[in-house]
Amino acid sequence: SAAQKDGYDWFMRKEIFEQPKAVADALLGRRGLNGQLALDEMRLSDEDVRDIDKIIIIACGTSFYAGMVAKYAIEHWCRIPVEVELSSEFRYRDPILDNGTLVVAISQSGETADTLQAIRHARVQKSKVLAICNTNGSTIPRESDAVIYTHAGPEIGVASTKGFLTQLVACYLLGLYLAQVRGVKFDDEIARILDQLDGIPAAIESVLADAESVYALARDYVSTKSVLFLGRHAGYPVALEGALKLKELAYIHAEGFAAGELKHGPIALVEEGLPIFCVIPPRGRDQLHEKMISGIQEVRARGARTICLAEEDDELIKPYADTLITLPKVPVLLQPLVATVPLQLFACELATAMGHDVDMPRNLAKSVTVE
Ligand code: G6P
């Protein structure tokens, strides 16, 4: 049954390995007749969708990082301004909302109180609400105008894994759906991106096939006091998620930074031997790639040990990586779907090696139903 660990030591580890299937399930049945993309529930007309002039994504925790990735994709594909905000901040700052605003609530459980209160507030201001959720019939989708279910299956581990990757898929689908209805992308462009998404389960499989080397790396870090994560563009939320996983599971100080911000503060933290994970953008985006490398040079010059996650044929990164974790080739906007996986494996294994309860980390709850 879904609540069995199937030979894994932790639900979390099992759920990490379920991700190829979870992503495939999240994509299943989305291409309807005439190539029209299908959401799970839609109570908005095409005209409503065309009238949207701003999107505000609200979420907490790991779901918030999915929202950050969504901003890059949706603004690029649809040319609609997107804000991303923590649910707990959104409601109390008097946000500007009207019936042209689409509020997108991302919640694995569908019961997070901060997010629920935020969508209630948005609806009172006449905004439309779309939920991205993994739990059928939970409160947040019930109170929304439209729903994309993530179809990841039950997630038991408190730290979200397959929930996150399938939220990313749902965010990409939302972006493509909006682009289609609003006519800002041609059907063949949408079909090309959907084909790239269809290749992701196999790409994740190839990352999982290397799990042992990530585990060996993690076991070297049991006495580490602090770890940093750097990323740019869609790699920035990946860095934040990698850091969150380490805090949640291994209880060690971990921070994610936008690589370009290093020089504005975080570089002061760098000292001899500090491990820094670096999410390297694909070579297809040379400007991002070059800028990332210059950031890495700065931290290495100060003694940091870099663990680089980079495309498999990225030769340029080699001189700058103390440790290299290779990723399959995918477009920059989709890279979070593969780059997050080694960071999940690392946190899971490090916490295991430290003797912590990976499925039930101290002080945390799977779903936080109080504000
Ligand atoms: C809790 C969990 C996190 C999760 C967050 C948001 O803090 O421990 O793993 O990301 O809630 O949950 P949601 O169900 O709204 O996605």
Image: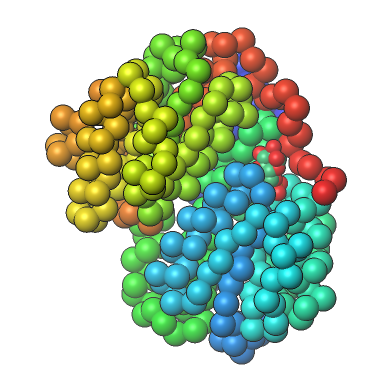
Residue 171 lies, in percent from the top left, at 53, 60
- State which image quarter holds ligand 1: top right
Residue 116 can be seen, yes or no:
yes
Quarter of the figure that contains the N terminus: top right
Left or right: 309, with 252 as reference point: left
Residue 147 can be seen, yes or no:
no
Count numbered badges in the picture: 0
Q: Is residue 50 above or below residue 8?
A: below
The residue lying at 45 percent from left, 26 percent from top is 227
Give the quarter of the image for residue 221.
top left
Left or right: 21, with 306 as reference point: right
Q: Is residue 38 above or below residue 53?
A: above
**In the foreground, 71 or 77:** 71
Q: Is residue 364 above or below residue 329?
A: above
Q: Is residue 115 above or below residue 224?
A: below
Q: How is the image coloured?
A: rainbow
Left or right: 347, with 90 as reference point: left
The residue lying at 44 percent from left, 77 percent from top is 79
The residue lying at 47 percent from left, 48 percent from top is 237
Left or right: 63, with 168 as reference point: right
**In the foreground, 223 or 185:** 223
Give the quarter of the image for residue 207.
top left
Residue 326 lies, in percent from the top left, at 29, 33
Residue 276 lies, in percent from the top left, at 37, 29
The residue lying at 51 percent from left, 30 percent from top is 254
